[in-house]
Amino acid sequence: MAAIRTNDLTKYYGDTRGIEDLSLDVREGEVFGFLGPNGAGKSTTIRMLMGFQSPTGGSAAVLGHDVTDRSAMIEAKRSIGYIPAEMGFDEGVTGRRFLRYQASLKGDTRSEELLELFDPPMDREIGEYSTGNKRKLAVVLAFMHDPDLLIMDEPTAGLDPLMQERFYEFIRDEQEQGVTVFFSSHILSEVQKICDRVGVIRNGHLVELENVETLLDRTGKRVSVHVAGTIEPGAFDIDGAHDVTVGGDEESSRPTAADGGERTNGSVPSTTEQNANEGDVNEGETSEDATSDPRDGASSGGGREGTTVSFTYTGDYNVLLDHLVEYDILDLDIADAPLEDVFMRFYGEVDPDQESGTVGSGTDV
């Protein structure tokens, strides 16, 4: 039996599409990632799977229970853990009091173990919690009754990198015990770390359903190569090279794959993103030192002038290597394509008519 099954699941808000004709199975014991940007339809899907909203069309079953059957969903939720994107806690009570209240509703067999692992400040009022502490409390509440299925909407939002890693390890341990996990995300790195399969959603439609390795192979790698001298436009128009950008030394400090990837909109990562990717600045090192790019000519080329070429590559690596040997390479960086590049593979130019089918701008539906 599939832990989650949807068949042509559809939700419209008036004339506005939330999701349409969504069909997928989540197998028992797998970690399934539901990948897409804000507004794609991830939260709409999860709210229907939890029985909070009724579909406009199609059907869905969770642990064999029809999501439109209220009494069946009450039974199903005894075996489901849930982490919403927006955590609606009573902020006027302590975390400990709120946990006791939840335990009276759904039982508690694991809270002591979970509190030791995630350590939210249980004796403080929830209204005083940081976003990260609220998220840690949400994790404890989701797992405290030892559910068979976890449905989570952006579960790591607000957690610091160390706590995220602890959460990923915890999920892997839970999977070994047979737990099924379904969670939405827009963070490719976490999908890659813990998911068996991933569904990619675009404008309310499922556009890809693959295991993670196949998805990454199809998405390709992000390549940044710094070569001596100048190169002619079109020099890297080779099979498998996409979105090629060429710049001189003045552009070589732009973020590349090593920094989490070049932004498709040309923006540089925020300080928070850089710290998350690179760690804290070392003692005696300024933030400017920590974020400078080793690809500038003075550091990597001994002062030699050069040109940086960046692109996403999905072709034969032997072809790429044969092409690169024609140049005097000062630096080379190859890494998994960043999330923006993955989305561009599946999203490309958005049709205005399709875009109007989603609700809002920047808020998942």
Image (cartoon, rainbow, N blue to C red):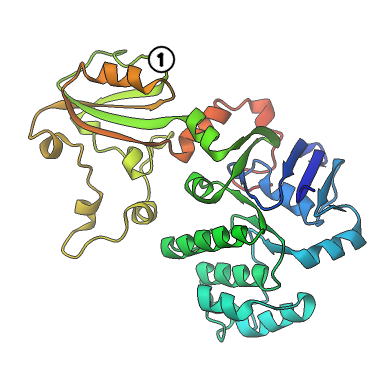
* Secondary element at tag 1: loop
Identified at 68% across, 29% down, the residue is: 354
Image x and y of residue 42, in percent: 67, 46
Q: Is residue 76 above or below residue 48?
A: below
Q: Is residue 52 left or right of residue 70?
A: left
Q: How many marks?
A: 1
| Residue found 20% across the figure and 16% down from its top | 326
Q: Position of residue 232 (x, y in %)?
A: 24, 13
Instruction: Please name the residue that numbered disc 1 is placed on.
Output: 239
Q: Quadrant of residue 155?
A: bottom right
Is 131 placed left or right of 257 in the picture? right
Q: Position of residue 41 (x, y in %)?
A: 69, 43
In this image, 4 relative to 90: left or right? right
Q: Residues within 10 Å of mark 1 (few under 14, many from 20)?
A: few
Say whether residue 94 is visible: no
Identify which amino acid the numbered label 1 is placed on: Asp
Does 168 sit above or below residue 363? Answer: below
Q: Is residue 269 rendered to the left or right of residue 98? A: left
Q: Residue at x 39, y 52 (%)?
A: 273
Q: x and y percent of residue 139 in the render? A: 60, 68
Q: Is residue 232 visible?
A: yes
Residue in the picture at 32% in, 58% down: 279
Vertical side of 147 occupied by 30: above or below = above
Above/below status of 238 relative to 297: above
Residues 30 and 264: in front is 30
Q: Farthest left residue?
A: 303
